Amino acid sequence: MKMRFFLSVLLFAGLTAGAQTKITFNTDLTGPRINKHIYGHFAEHLGKCIYGGIYVGENNTKIPNVQGIRNDVVQALKELKVPNLRWPGGCFADTYQWKDGIGPKADRPKMVNVWWGGVTEDNSFGTHDFLDLCERIGAEPYLAGNVGSGTVKDLSDWVSYVNNPGGSPMSELRKKNGREKPWNVKLWGVGNEAWGCGGNMTAEYYANIYRQYATFMTDWDNNAKLYKIASGATDGDYGWTETLMKNIPHKMLAGVALHHYSVLSWEDKGPSVDFTEAQYFKSMQEASQMDEFITGHSTIMDKYDPEKKVALIVDEWGGWYNVEPGTNPGFLYQQNTMRDAVIAGLTLNIFNNHADRVRGANLAQVVNVLQSVILTNEEKMLLTPTYHVMKMYNVHQDAALVPINIESPLYEFQGKALKAVSSSASKDESGAINISLTNIDYSKAHEVVINLRGESFARVSGQILSAAKIRDHNTFENPQKVSIKSFSGAVLDKGILKLVIPAYSVITLKVTK
Ligand code: AHR
């Protein structure tokens, strides 16, 4: 009877299911905590991320704002539960002179943003503006220090400016600029991409530089020790990680970064919307490689740090395509389709399942740049499919990972194959299990059978992000085209959950006792 019902659900949905996905969640065995910081975001002085996307100026009467920061964007980011926000770069961070971004705005020196479009940076959005934004959205700030072109003293002073309670020249300067109490910023990047735009250093040289800069980054509040993150490898550069883990004393190293973008090729990244299946498949190959890279870097880290004290922080990830036609090539503005939704779902499942070592990550970037969760156009704002996935998955923040065994059918294309369905689950404080599932298949739905081994559950509810077409996306004219719907297609019977996950879609389920 139950099976007949299940099959009729399949037929009703009008779906041709591929091979079965078999999953077991060991609900009585809890794994490590999924650190909420895995769900972090990134805001660089790049294109229209800060200027236009977040900050529109104090005198703007057209776009509702408080002290120049857009109210609509603040509201959307609050609802997303952003745990941390990385700023001011990226490549820009290693050119940034933080002292040019404090004090009366009219007096602030200007600079040229050499990495991103050669535009003039007037420094009207600086440290106070960023830290106020973080307070408003309830996110922890993650400051990326300038190691490539700034001095040890510059970075040491920045730490003192934001964290020293009083009595230092920097804390007095902060107070003079209107902020009495320190912000107590805990998360600090010591440079960015030191192997490239951050100074073209060798790993050995950077490891020494890291030790030097980190030494003068003082813990002004002993209760909130600084969490220092070394500029990490890109993709599979395991030698970089090995050198850092070997040469930097672990007591001065909280995390090592990793960057990996899903990019077709650096020469031609392909269109963000009108992609072919070949381009889609390559994007999925690239996104799936995150698992291999995390495993590779973690294995090296295990050699030097078997207790897993040093975290792997994937502080840049996401899909990277050609810019939208007619936009500034240096601004990295791209649309966001169901391809991006499944990249997000797949990647977050990978992060969750590596929660023992991956304890932070930052999607690049939050507004109007690369795989954004928000796009703006003057006073208009829209939430992208990626926003919806990040929101559906935020149930995992700080919950306990539930160990998984999964057998997935394959998504095959021209003789190559990838696992079509990925999943992860966590147990929250009430004992409910939240399960997330992503199907990257270009055209096939897949039947999913989940064995909830260990404990008994009575009820299931769910949400789905899917669309009629894989290239569907939200526009300023039709901002709700892709949005979260409730999902009642999961059947729970005697500890077994059955459902069909449509092609290129993301589902989250909550099972309760
Ligand atoms: O996110 C865009 C750029 O990509 C960042 O500035 C840099 O760190 C990376 O190469």
Image (cartoon, grey):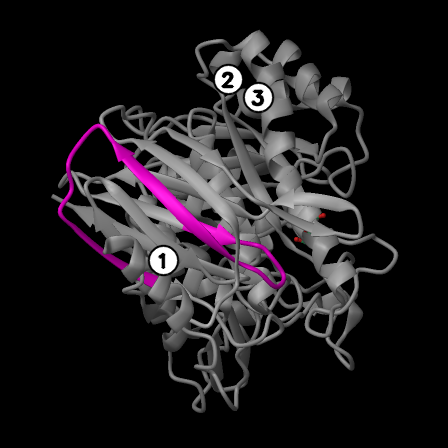
Which is nearer the eye, 275 or 108? 275
Taking the spot 59% from the left edge, 17% from the top edge, the residue there is 299
Circle 1 residues within 10 Å: few <14, some 14–19, many ≥20? many
Residue 375 percent coordinates (x, y)? 54, 74
- Give residue 209's quadrant in the image: top right
| Callout 1 amino acid | Met
Residue labelled with disc 3: 298
What is the residue that sits farthest to the right in this orientation? 267
Residue labelled with disc 2: 252
Lower sequence index among marks 3 and 1: 3
Question: CA gap, disc 2 to disc 3?
Answer: 19 Å
| Callout 3 amino acid | Ser
Viewed as shown, does residue 181 lie left or right of 264? left
Question: CA gap, disc 3 to disc 1?
Answer: 27 Å
- Are the residues flagged by discs 2 and 1 in contact, CB closer than 8 Å? no
Q: Is mark 1 within 8 Å of ligand 1?
A: no
Taking the spot 57% from the left edge, 50% from the top edge, the residue there is 98
Residue labelled with disc 1: 392
Viewed as shown, does residue 81 lie left or right of 68? left
Circle 2 residues within 10 Å: few <14, some 14–19, many ≥20? some
Residue 425 percent coordinates (x, y)? 34, 40
Q: Nearer the viewer, mark 2 or mark 1?
A: 1
As for residue 85 lying within the magenta part, the answer is no
Asked if residue 283 is positioned above or below residue 8 in the image, the reply reads above
Asked if residue 455 is positioned above or below residue 1 in the image, the reply reads above
Residue 512 percent coordinates (x, y)? 16, 46
Lower sequence index among marks 2 and 1: 2
Q: Quadrant of the C terminus?
A: top left
Q: Which residues are magenta?
A: 437-463
Determine the main secondary structure of the stretch shown in magenta: strand
